[in-house]
Image: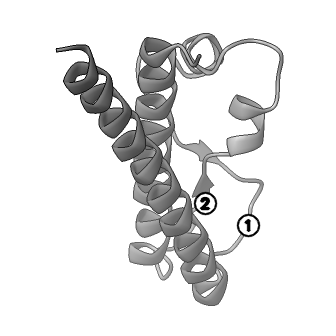
Amino acid sequence: MINTHNSINTTLNALDLIAERHKALSSNLANMDTPNYKRKDISFSQYLGGANPLETKLASVMGPSPVMIDTLNERVDPANELSEMQKNSILYTIASRRMSNIITEMKTVINVGS
């Protein structure tokens, strides 16, 4: 059986990370004509691709809340930013559906157990 508490925490952290990435991408679009503006991004792979739990990696790398990182002198490409926003939107949909499934499972257990 899935540990519901860990699933909820992991999904919440993923939703927080997705929200922070959306802020970075929208900031890039808003500032694409600003002189000397450096593109900002958050890499999912550095938080999701290790042996440590997601919560530990987020806390150790970003502190209590995610921090946007400047990319190496990348100019903002509006088509690329919109494409990345679309990918981010798909990740949000997946994570929010996962949270909905967790809540439905909890309701089922409560109803069956009563």
Residue in the image at 40% along x and 56% along y: 23
Relative horizontal placement of residue 53, taking residue 81 as reference (left or right): right
Give the label on residue 74, or none.
1
Q: Residue at x 61, y 10 (%)?
A: 56
Judge by depth and name the residue closer to the eye, 57 or 99: 99
Closer to the N terminus: mark 2 or mark 1? 2
Can residue 66 be seen here? no
Q: Amino acid at mark 2?
A: Lys
For numbered disc 2, what is the local secondary structure? loop
User: Label 1 neighbourhood size at 10 Å, few (<14), some (14-19), many (20+)?
Assistant: few
Q: How crowded is the residue under tag 2: few (<14 C-alpha within 10 Å), some, or many (20+)? A: some
Above or below, 81 against 93 in this view is: below
Q: Residue at x 52, y 72 (%)?
A: 85
Distance (Cα) linking label 2 and label 1? 6 Å
Tag 2–tag 1 contact (CB < 8 Å): yes
Give amino acid for label 1. Answer: Glu
Pinpoint residue 76: horizontal percent, then vertical percent: 62, 76
| Callout 1: SS | loop
Q: Horizontal and vertical percent for residue 34? A: 46, 74
Mark carried by residue 38? 2
Residue 23 visible in rendering: yes
